[in-house]
Image: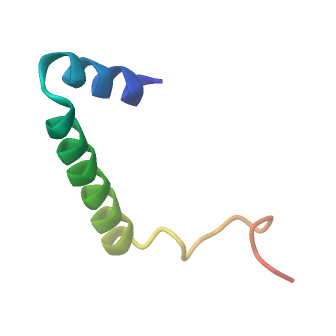
Amino acid sequence: NVGAVIFLTILSFTSPKKIFIIAALYAAIVLIALIFLNPFNNLHKSFKKN
């Protein structure tokens, strides 16, 4: 997994406290992207409820 390698590489150069801050910031960026990109309008028919 590319993400795991990136986070472990960052961990090898920084302290554990900083890696958790970086992971939290990354999660916030992903959450904002999910809200503004609104990807849930065109779901595949297998995901739609009957």
Q: Residue at x 48, y 68 (%)?
A: 39
State the residue in front, 33 or 24. Answer: 24
State the residue in front, 24 or 49. Answer: 24
Q: Residue at x 59, y 71 (%)?
A: 42
User: Where, by quadrant of the figure, is residue 28 drawn?
Assistant: bottom left
Where 47 sits versus 9, above or below?
A: below
Judged left or right of residue 19, residue 40 is right
Place of residue 44 in the rendered image (x, y in percent of width and height, measured from the top left): 70, 64
Q: Residue at x 36, y 20 (%)?
A: 5
Q: Residue at x 77, y 68 (%)?
A: 45
User: Where, by quadrant of the figure, is residue 8 drawn?
Assistant: top left
User: Where, by quadrant of the figure, is residue 17 drawn?
Assistant: top left
Place of residue 43 in the rendered image (x, y in percent of width and height, measured from the top left): 64, 68
Q: Quadrant of the C terminus?
A: bottom right
Which residue is the extreme one toward the right? 50
Where 27 sits versus 14, above or below?
A: below
Question: What color scheme is it?
Answer: rainbow
